[in-house]
Amino acid sequence: MNKVTTEEDIRNILNQMGEKALTAALALALLSPEAKNKCLLRMADALENAAQEIKTANQQDLAAGRKKGLSPALLDRLELTDSRIKAMADGLRAVAELDDPVGRKLSSTVRPNGLRIDKVSVPLGVIGIIFESRPNVTADAAGLCLKAGNAVILRGGSEAINSNLALAHCLNRAGVIAGLPDGAVQLVPVTDRRAVNLLVKMDQYIDLIIPRGGEGLIRAVVEQATIPVIKHYKGVCHLYVDADADLEMALRVTENGKCQRPGVCNALETLLINEKIADKFIPPFVECMRRNQVELRGDEAFCQRVPDAKFATEEDFYTEYIDLIFSVKIVPDAAAAVKHINHYGSHHSDAIITENPETAAFFLRGVDSATVYHNASTRFTDGYEFGMGAEIGISTDKLHARGPMGLAELTSYKYLIYGNGQIRT
Protein backbone atom coordinates (compact mmCIF):
# COMPACT_ATOMS: atom_id res chain seq x y z
CA MET A 1 0.00 0.00 0.00
CA ASN A 2 1.37 3.40 -0.98
CA LYS A 3 2.45 5.65 1.89
CA VAL A 4 1.16 9.12 1.10
CA THR A 5 0.98 12.20 3.24
CA THR A 6 -0.31 15.03 1.07
CA GLU A 7 -3.22 15.62 -1.24
CA GLU A 8 -0.74 16.23 -4.06
CA ASP A 9 0.71 12.74 -3.53
CA ILE A 10 -2.78 11.25 -3.81
CA ARG A 11 -3.57 13.33 -6.88
CA ASN A 12 -0.39 12.13 -8.62
CA ILE A 13 -1.21 8.48 -7.90
CA LEU A 14 -4.76 8.86 -9.23
CA ASN A 15 -3.67 10.75 -12.34
CA GLN A 16 -1.19 8.01 -13.18
CA MET A 17 -3.94 5.43 -12.72
CA GLY A 18 -6.34 7.48 -14.84
CA GLU A 19 -3.90 7.81 -17.75
CA LYS A 20 -3.16 4.10 -17.60
CA ALA A 21 -6.88 3.22 -17.50
CA LEU A 22 -7.70 5.49 -20.44
CA THR A 23 -4.99 3.90 -22.57
CA ALA A 24 -6.21 0.44 -21.55
CA ALA A 25 -9.84 1.30 -22.34
CA LEU A 26 -8.97 2.29 -25.92
CA ALA A 27 -7.18 -1.05 -26.40
CA LEU A 28 -9.97 -3.00 -24.69
CA ALA A 29 -12.55 -1.62 -27.11
CA LEU A 30 -10.73 -3.43 -29.91
CA LEU A 31 -10.54 -6.84 -28.19
CA SER A 32 -12.70 -9.61 -29.65
CA PRO A 33 -15.28 -11.41 -27.49
CA GLU A 34 -13.06 -14.49 -27.59
CA ALA A 35 -10.05 -12.55 -26.34
CA LYS A 36 -12.00 -11.02 -23.46
CA ASN A 37 -13.41 -14.41 -22.48
CA LYS A 38 -9.94 -15.94 -22.49
CA CYS A 39 -8.77 -13.23 -20.09
CA LEU A 40 -11.74 -13.76 -17.77
CA LEU A 41 -11.13 -17.52 -17.62
CA ARG A 42 -7.43 -17.05 -16.89
CA MET A 43 -8.33 -14.58 -14.15
CA ALA A 44 -10.74 -17.10 -12.64
CA ASP A 45 -8.05 -19.78 -12.55
CA ALA A 46 -5.58 -17.32 -11.06
CA LEU A 47 -7.91 -16.52 -8.15
CA GLU A 48 -8.17 -20.16 -7.19
CA ASN A 49 -4.42 -20.71 -7.60
CA ALA A 50 -3.66 -17.69 -5.41
CA ALA A 51 -6.20 -18.60 -2.73
CA GLN A 52 -3.61 -18.93 0.05
CA GLU A 53 -1.98 -15.61 -0.82
CA ILE A 54 -5.40 -13.91 -0.87
CA LYS A 55 -6.44 -15.45 2.45
CA THR A 56 -3.18 -14.32 4.07
CA ALA A 57 -3.91 -10.74 3.03
CA ASN A 58 -7.49 -11.15 4.19
CA GLN A 59 -6.32 -12.30 7.64
CA GLN A 60 -4.52 -8.96 8.04
CA ASP A 61 -7.82 -7.15 7.41
CA LEU A 62 -9.75 -9.43 9.76
CA ALA A 63 -7.21 -8.89 12.54
CA ALA A 64 -7.37 -5.13 12.06
CA GLY A 65 -11.18 -5.31 11.99
CA ARG A 66 -11.35 -7.20 15.27
CA LYS A 67 -8.98 -4.66 16.83
CA LYS A 68 -11.24 -1.83 15.64
CA GLY A 69 -14.30 -3.60 17.07
CA LEU A 70 -16.11 -4.41 13.82
CA SER A 71 -19.35 -6.30 14.42
CA PRO A 72 -19.55 -10.06 13.73
CA ALA A 73 -21.79 -9.31 10.72
CA LEU A 74 -19.21 -6.95 9.19
CA LEU A 75 -16.38 -9.38 9.89
CA ASP A 76 -18.37 -12.08 8.14
CA ARG A 77 -18.86 -9.84 5.09
CA LEU A 78 -15.13 -9.19 5.09
CA GLU A 79 -13.88 -12.76 5.42
CA LEU A 80 -12.62 -14.65 2.36
CA THR A 81 -12.78 -18.43 2.63
CA ASP A 82 -11.86 -21.06 0.04
CA SER A 83 -15.53 -21.39 -0.90
CA ARG A 84 -15.93 -17.62 -1.31
CA ILE A 85 -12.82 -17.37 -3.46
CA LYS A 86 -14.12 -20.24 -5.58
CA ALA A 87 -17.46 -18.42 -5.87
CA MET A 88 -15.64 -15.33 -7.19
CA ALA A 89 -13.79 -17.47 -9.72
CA ASP A 90 -17.00 -19.19 -10.79
CA GLY A 91 -18.60 -15.76 -11.13
CA LEU A 92 -15.92 -14.74 -13.63
CA ARG A 93 -16.47 -17.96 -15.56
CA ALA A 94 -20.21 -17.28 -15.62
CA VAL A 95 -19.59 -13.77 -16.98
CA ALA A 96 -17.41 -15.27 -19.73
CA GLU A 97 -20.38 -17.41 -20.78
CA LEU A 98 -22.69 -14.41 -21.23
CA ASP A 99 -23.38 -12.86 -24.61
CA ASP A 100 -21.01 -10.03 -25.44
CA PRO A 101 -22.85 -6.70 -25.15
CA VAL A 102 -20.44 -4.81 -27.43
CA GLY A 103 -21.00 -4.43 -31.18
CA ARG A 104 -24.74 -5.13 -31.16
CA LYS A 105 -26.61 -3.35 -33.94
CA LEU A 106 -29.35 -1.52 -32.06
CA SER A 107 -30.97 -0.02 -35.17
CA SER A 108 -30.27 0.60 -38.84
CA THR A 109 -31.80 3.25 -41.09
CA VAL A 110 -31.29 4.06 -44.77
CA ARG A 111 -31.91 7.72 -45.57
CA PRO A 112 -33.43 8.95 -48.87
CA ASN A 113 -29.98 10.09 -49.96
CA GLY A 114 -28.63 6.54 -49.58
CA LEU A 115 -26.76 7.02 -46.29
CA ARG A 116 -27.01 3.98 -44.03
CA ILE A 117 -26.96 4.88 -40.31
CA ASP A 118 -26.27 2.05 -37.88
CA LYS A 119 -26.60 2.52 -34.10
CA VAL A 120 -24.11 0.17 -32.44
CA SER A 121 -23.34 -0.61 -28.78
CA VAL A 122 -19.86 0.34 -27.56
CA PRO A 123 -18.04 0.31 -24.20
CA LEU A 124 -18.50 3.28 -21.90
CA GLY A 125 -14.73 3.62 -21.47
CA VAL A 126 -13.37 3.92 -17.91
CA ILE A 127 -15.65 3.14 -14.97
CA GLY A 128 -14.88 4.08 -11.39
CA ILE A 129 -16.45 1.87 -8.71
CA ILE A 130 -16.44 2.95 -5.06
CA PHE A 131 -17.57 0.29 -2.63
CA GLU A 132 -17.55 -0.73 1.01
CA SER A 133 -16.74 -3.88 2.93
CA ARG A 134 -17.18 -7.00 0.81
CA PRO A 135 -13.96 -7.68 -1.12
CA ASN A 136 -15.76 -10.00 -3.56
CA VAL A 137 -16.96 -6.82 -5.30
CA THR A 138 -13.39 -6.43 -6.60
CA ALA A 139 -13.68 -9.55 -8.73
CA ASP A 140 -17.38 -9.17 -9.59
CA ALA A 141 -17.08 -5.58 -10.76
CA ALA A 142 -13.85 -6.18 -12.65
CA GLY A 143 -15.34 -9.12 -14.54
CA LEU A 144 -18.48 -7.31 -15.61
CA CYS A 145 -16.65 -4.14 -16.65
CA LEU A 146 -14.08 -6.08 -18.68
CA LYS A 147 -16.71 -8.18 -20.44
CA ALA A 148 -18.35 -4.93 -21.57
CA GLY A 149 -14.99 -3.66 -22.82
CA ASN A 150 -14.37 -1.13 -20.04
CA ALA A 151 -11.33 -0.40 -17.94
CA VAL A 152 -12.13 -0.14 -14.24
CA ILE A 153 -10.68 1.79 -11.31
CA LEU A 154 -11.82 0.31 -8.00
CA ARG A 155 -11.78 2.00 -4.62
CA GLY A 156 -12.74 -0.30 -1.76
CA GLY A 157 -13.21 0.39 1.93
CA SER A 158 -10.20 0.80 4.21
CA GLU A 159 -11.25 -2.25 6.23
CA ALA A 160 -10.56 -4.52 3.20
CA ILE A 161 -7.51 -2.78 1.72
CA ASN A 162 -5.12 -5.74 1.93
CA SER A 163 -7.69 -8.21 0.56
CA ASN A 164 -8.64 -5.89 -2.29
CA LEU A 165 -5.04 -5.17 -3.26
CA ALA A 166 -4.27 -8.89 -3.36
CA LEU A 167 -7.34 -9.59 -5.48
CA ALA A 168 -6.73 -6.71 -7.90
CA HIS A 169 -3.05 -7.61 -8.30
CA CYS A 170 -3.97 -11.23 -9.00
CA LEU A 171 -6.65 -10.28 -11.54
CA ASN A 172 -4.51 -7.74 -13.38
CA ARG A 173 -1.45 -9.99 -13.49
CA ALA A 174 -3.41 -12.94 -14.91
CA GLY A 175 -5.30 -10.73 -17.34
CA VAL A 176 -2.14 -9.14 -18.76
CA ILE A 177 -0.55 -12.56 -19.27
CA ALA A 178 -3.69 -13.59 -21.19
CA GLY A 179 -3.63 -10.48 -23.39
CA LEU A 180 -5.47 -7.84 -21.38
CA PRO A 181 -4.01 -4.32 -21.67
CA ASP A 182 -2.14 -3.35 -18.50
CA GLY A 183 -4.22 -0.95 -16.45
CA ALA A 184 -7.58 -2.48 -17.35
CA VAL A 185 -8.07 -3.45 -13.69
CA GLN A 186 -6.69 -1.12 -11.02
CA LEU A 187 -7.40 -0.58 -7.35
CA VAL A 188 -6.73 2.69 -5.56
CA PRO A 189 -4.02 1.82 -3.00
CA VAL A 190 -4.85 4.79 -0.77
CA THR A 191 -7.20 4.53 2.23
CA ASP A 192 -7.26 8.29 2.83
CA ARG A 193 -10.79 9.61 2.24
CA ARG A 194 -9.38 12.43 0.15
CA ALA A 195 -8.81 9.83 -2.57
CA VAL A 196 -12.56 9.49 -3.10
CA ASN A 197 -13.06 13.25 -3.32
CA LEU A 198 -10.35 13.47 -5.98
CA LEU A 199 -11.38 10.33 -7.87
CA VAL A 200 -14.93 11.51 -8.48
CA LYS A 201 -13.64 14.70 -10.11
CA MET A 202 -11.36 12.95 -12.62
CA ASP A 203 -13.69 13.55 -15.56
CA GLN A 204 -10.72 13.78 -17.94
CA TYR A 205 -10.24 10.03 -17.44
CA ILE A 206 -13.38 8.46 -15.96
CA ASP A 207 -16.72 8.23 -17.81
CA LEU A 208 -18.97 6.89 -15.05
CA ILE A 209 -18.90 6.44 -11.27
CA ILE A 210 -20.86 3.62 -9.58
CA PRO A 211 -20.93 3.81 -5.77
CA ARG A 212 -21.94 0.66 -3.89
CA GLY A 213 -22.59 0.94 -0.18
CA GLY A 214 -24.63 2.80 2.40
CA GLU A 215 -26.68 5.91 1.79
CA GLY A 216 -24.03 8.10 3.43
CA LEU A 217 -21.32 6.98 1.01
CA ILE A 218 -23.56 7.38 -2.02
CA ARG A 219 -24.74 10.87 -1.08
CA ALA A 220 -21.15 11.97 -0.43
CA VAL A 221 -20.11 10.72 -3.87
CA VAL A 222 -23.02 12.45 -5.61
CA GLU A 223 -22.32 15.75 -3.84
CA GLN A 224 -18.64 15.71 -4.82
CA ALA A 225 -18.71 14.20 -8.32
CA THR A 226 -18.21 16.04 -11.59
CA ILE A 227 -18.71 12.71 -13.39
CA PRO A 228 -22.11 11.07 -14.04
CA VAL A 229 -23.06 8.80 -11.10
CA ILE A 230 -25.32 5.74 -11.28
CA LYS A 231 -26.79 4.95 -7.88
CA HIS A 232 -29.65 4.19 -5.57
CA TYR A 233 -29.70 5.82 -2.17
CA LYS A 234 -31.88 3.27 -0.37
CA GLY A 235 -34.59 0.67 -0.86
CA VAL A 236 -37.84 1.72 0.81
CA CYS A 237 -39.88 -1.03 -0.88
CA HIS A 238 -43.67 -1.40 -0.53
CA LEU A 239 -46.28 -4.11 -0.93
CA TYR A 240 -49.93 -3.13 -1.38
CA VAL A 241 -52.51 -5.80 -0.56
CA ASP A 242 -55.58 -4.89 -2.62
CA ALA A 243 -59.26 -5.51 -1.84
CA ASP A 244 -59.24 -8.18 -4.56
CA ALA A 245 -56.10 -9.92 -3.37
CA ASP A 246 -55.64 -13.64 -2.90
CA LEU A 247 -54.87 -13.35 0.82
CA GLU A 248 -52.89 -16.58 1.05
CA MET A 249 -50.69 -15.33 -1.77
CA ALA A 250 -50.43 -11.94 -0.09
CA LEU A 251 -49.25 -13.49 3.17
CA ARG A 252 -46.70 -15.69 1.41
CA VAL A 253 -45.29 -12.78 -0.63
CA THR A 254 -45.23 -10.50 2.44
CA GLU A 255 -43.28 -13.02 4.49
CA ASN A 256 -40.79 -13.60 1.69
CA GLY A 257 -40.33 -9.91 1.00
CA LYS A 258 -39.80 -8.92 4.63
CA CYS A 259 -38.30 -11.92 6.38
CA GLN A 260 -36.15 -13.91 3.95
CA ARG A 261 -33.27 -11.38 3.97
CA PRO A 262 -34.31 -8.18 5.76
CA GLY A 263 -30.90 -6.57 5.33
CA VAL A 264 -30.96 -6.20 1.53
CA CYS A 265 -32.16 -3.29 -0.57
CA ASN A 266 -35.05 -5.18 -2.23
CA ALA A 267 -36.62 -6.31 1.07
CA LEU A 268 -39.99 -4.84 2.05
CA GLU A 269 -40.10 -1.94 4.50
CA THR A 270 -43.77 -0.87 4.32
CA LEU A 271 -47.01 -2.84 3.93
CA LEU A 272 -50.16 -1.09 2.68
CA ILE A 273 -53.45 -2.90 3.33
CA ASN A 274 -56.77 -2.08 1.70
CA GLU A 275 -59.32 -1.24 4.40
CA LYS A 276 -61.92 -3.61 2.89
CA ILE A 277 -59.84 -6.71 3.71
CA ALA A 278 -57.93 -5.36 6.72
CA ASP A 279 -59.91 -7.20 9.38
CA LYS A 280 -59.55 -10.48 7.52
CA PHE A 281 -55.88 -10.13 6.56
CA ILE A 282 -54.37 -8.55 9.67
CA PRO A 283 -54.76 -11.50 12.14
CA PRO A 284 -52.81 -14.05 10.04
CA PHE A 285 -50.34 -11.33 9.00
CA VAL A 286 -49.61 -10.39 12.64
CA GLU A 287 -49.24 -14.05 13.60
CA CYS A 288 -46.78 -14.57 10.76
CA MET A 289 -44.73 -11.50 11.70
CA ARG A 290 -44.61 -12.49 15.38
CA ARG A 291 -43.41 -15.93 14.36
CA ASN A 292 -40.57 -14.21 12.46
CA GLN A 293 -39.88 -11.80 15.36
CA VAL A 294 -40.76 -8.73 13.28
CA GLU A 295 -41.47 -5.47 15.11
CA LEU A 296 -44.60 -3.78 13.72
CA ARG A 297 -45.09 -0.02 13.52
CA GLY A 298 -48.51 1.04 12.27
CA ASP A 299 -50.73 4.00 11.56
CA GLU A 300 -53.67 4.77 13.86
CA ALA A 301 -56.06 2.42 12.03
CA PHE A 302 -53.61 -0.49 12.27
CA CYS A 303 -52.73 0.17 15.93
CA GLN A 304 -56.44 0.15 16.84
CA ARG A 305 -56.58 -3.40 15.50
CA VAL A 306 -53.17 -4.41 16.89
CA PRO A 307 -52.79 -2.63 20.26
CA ASP A 308 -49.28 -3.93 20.96
CA ALA A 309 -47.91 -2.47 17.70
CA LYS A 310 -45.84 0.70 17.95
CA PHE A 311 -47.24 3.89 16.47
CA ALA A 312 -45.47 4.72 13.20
CA THR A 313 -44.05 8.21 12.93
CA GLU A 314 -43.82 10.20 9.70
CA GLU A 315 -40.12 9.39 9.59
CA ASP A 316 -40.80 5.64 9.85
CA PHE A 317 -42.51 5.65 6.46
CA TYR A 318 -39.38 7.13 4.87
CA THR A 319 -37.06 4.67 6.59
CA GLU A 320 -35.11 1.77 5.12
CA TYR A 321 -34.86 -0.37 8.26
CA ILE A 322 -32.76 -3.19 6.74
CA ASP A 323 -33.93 -5.06 9.83
CA LEU A 324 -36.93 -7.03 11.12
CA ILE A 325 -39.03 -3.89 11.50
CA PHE A 326 -42.11 -3.26 9.37
CA SER A 327 -44.22 -0.14 8.82
CA VAL A 328 -47.92 -0.82 8.16
CA LYS A 329 -50.66 1.49 6.91
CA ILE A 330 -54.32 0.91 6.04
CA VAL A 331 -55.44 2.71 2.89
CA PRO A 332 -58.85 3.14 1.20
CA ASP A 333 -57.87 2.08 -2.32
CA ALA A 334 -55.12 1.57 -4.90
CA ALA A 335 -54.98 5.28 -5.70
CA ALA A 336 -54.08 6.04 -2.08
CA ALA A 337 -51.47 3.28 -2.14
CA VAL A 338 -49.86 4.70 -5.28
CA LYS A 339 -49.85 8.19 -3.79
CA HIS A 340 -48.22 6.93 -0.58
CA ILE A 341 -45.54 4.99 -2.48
CA ASN A 342 -44.64 7.88 -4.77
CA HIS A 343 -44.37 10.20 -1.76
CA TYR A 344 -42.48 8.03 0.74
CA GLY A 345 -40.76 5.48 -1.49
CA SER A 346 -37.26 5.41 -2.96
CA HIS A 347 -38.26 4.47 -6.55
CA HIS A 348 -36.63 1.05 -6.11
CA SER A 349 -39.09 -1.89 -5.98
CA ASP A 350 -42.80 -1.95 -5.16
CA ALA A 351 -45.55 -4.54 -5.57
CA ILE A 352 -49.31 -5.11 -5.63
CA ILE A 353 -51.21 -8.29 -4.81
CA THR A 354 -54.55 -8.34 -6.61
CA GLU A 355 -56.68 -10.54 -8.84
CA ASN A 356 -58.17 -7.47 -10.52
CA PRO A 357 -56.33 -6.80 -13.82
CA GLU A 358 -57.58 -3.21 -14.07
CA THR A 359 -56.32 -2.36 -10.59
CA ALA A 360 -53.02 -4.07 -11.35
CA ALA A 361 -52.63 -2.06 -14.58
CA PHE A 362 -53.39 1.19 -12.73
CA PHE A 363 -50.78 0.37 -10.07
CA LEU A 364 -48.10 -0.68 -12.57
CA ARG A 365 -48.57 2.52 -14.58
CA GLY A 366 -48.86 4.81 -11.57
CA VAL A 367 -45.96 3.76 -9.35
CA ASP A 368 -42.81 5.67 -10.33
CA SER A 369 -40.24 3.02 -9.46
CA ALA A 370 -37.52 1.16 -11.35
CA THR A 371 -39.25 -2.20 -10.82
CA VAL A 372 -42.97 -2.69 -10.15
CA TYR A 373 -44.46 -6.13 -9.48
CA HIS A 374 -47.88 -7.71 -9.80
CA ASN A 375 -48.41 -10.79 -7.60
CA ALA A 376 -44.70 -11.39 -6.94
CA SER A 377 -42.07 -10.58 -4.33
CA THR A 378 -39.83 -7.52 -4.59
CA ARG A 379 -36.95 -9.84 -3.69
CA PHE A 380 -36.60 -10.64 -7.40
CA THR A 381 -35.00 -7.24 -8.12
CA ASP A 382 -31.61 -8.67 -8.95
CA GLY A 383 -29.58 -8.99 -12.14
CA TYR A 384 -29.29 -12.76 -11.87
CA GLU A 385 -33.04 -13.18 -11.28
CA PHE A 386 -33.75 -10.92 -14.28
CA GLY A 387 -31.70 -13.21 -16.52
CA MET A 388 -28.77 -10.81 -16.84
CA GLY A 389 -26.32 -13.37 -15.48
CA ALA A 390 -24.94 -10.87 -12.98
CA GLU A 391 -25.28 -7.25 -11.98
CA ILE A 392 -23.04 -4.31 -11.25
CA GLY A 393 -25.69 -2.72 -9.03
CA ILE A 394 -29.23 -1.36 -9.00
CA SER A 395 -30.12 2.11 -10.23
CA THR A 396 -33.08 4.26 -9.29
CA ASP A 397 -31.96 6.90 -11.78
CA LYS A 398 -33.70 7.35 -15.13
CA LEU A 399 -30.58 8.16 -17.17
CA HIS A 400 -28.91 6.11 -18.49
CA ALA A 401 -29.79 2.93 -16.60
CA ARG A 402 -32.70 1.99 -14.35
CA GLY A 403 -33.22 -1.09 -12.18
CA PRO A 404 -30.73 -3.98 -12.08
CA MET A 405 -27.67 -3.13 -14.17
CA GLY A 406 -26.16 -5.92 -16.22
CA LEU A 407 -23.68 -5.94 -19.08
CA ALA A 408 -25.92 -4.00 -21.48
CA GLU A 409 -26.08 -1.11 -18.99
CA LEU A 410 -22.27 -0.93 -18.99
CA THR A 411 -22.29 0.09 -22.65
CA SER A 412 -23.19 3.21 -24.57
CA TYR A 413 -23.66 3.50 -28.32
CA LYS A 414 -22.38 5.35 -31.33
CA TYR A 415 -23.60 5.88 -34.88
CA LEU A 416 -21.76 4.38 -37.84
CA ILE A 417 -22.66 6.07 -41.13
CA TYR A 418 -21.97 4.44 -44.49
CA GLY A 419 -22.09 6.40 -47.71
CA ASN A 420 -20.78 6.50 -51.27
CA GLY A 421 -19.73 10.12 -51.59
CA GLN A 422 -22.83 11.96 -50.36
CA ILE A 423 -22.42 15.65 -49.50
CA ARG A 424 -24.86 17.93 -47.73
CA THR A 425 -26.36 20.74 -49.82
Image (cartoon, rainbow, N blue to C red):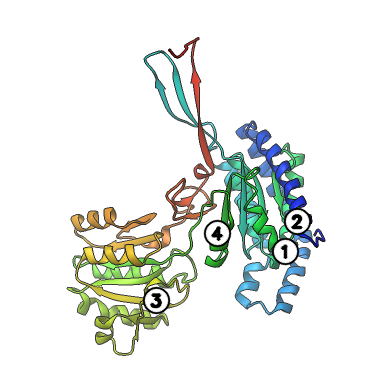
Task: Confirm or deny contact between disc 3 and disc 2 (CB under 8 A).
Answer: no
Mark found first going from the N terminus, 2 or 1: 2
Q: Report the Cα–Cα distance between label 1 and label 3.
A: 34 Å
Tell me where residue 51 appears, x and y as whole percent.
74, 58
In the image, residue 73 lies at what x, y percent?
60, 74
Relative vertical location of residue 319 with respect to residue 55 in this rendering, above or below: below
Identify the residue at horizontal 56%, vertical 53% (top origin): 210
Q: CA distance from mark 2 to mark 1?
A: 9 Å
Q: Position of residue 416 (x, y in %)?
A: 51, 24
Question: Which corner quadrant of the image does residue 6 belong to?
Answer: bottom right
Q: Residue furthest right?
A: 3
Marks 3 and 4 in Cβ contact (< 8 Å): no
Q: CA distance from mark 2 to mark 4?
A: 20 Å
- Between circles 4 and 1, the one closer to the viewer is 4
Q: Which mark is drawn over residue 223?
A: 4
Q: Which residue is mark 1?
A: 192
Looking at the rendered structure, the kind of residue marked 1 is Asp
Examine the rendering and report whether any part of residue 283 can be seen.
no
The residue carrying mark 2 is 10
Q: Nearer the viewer, mark 3 or mark 2?
A: 2
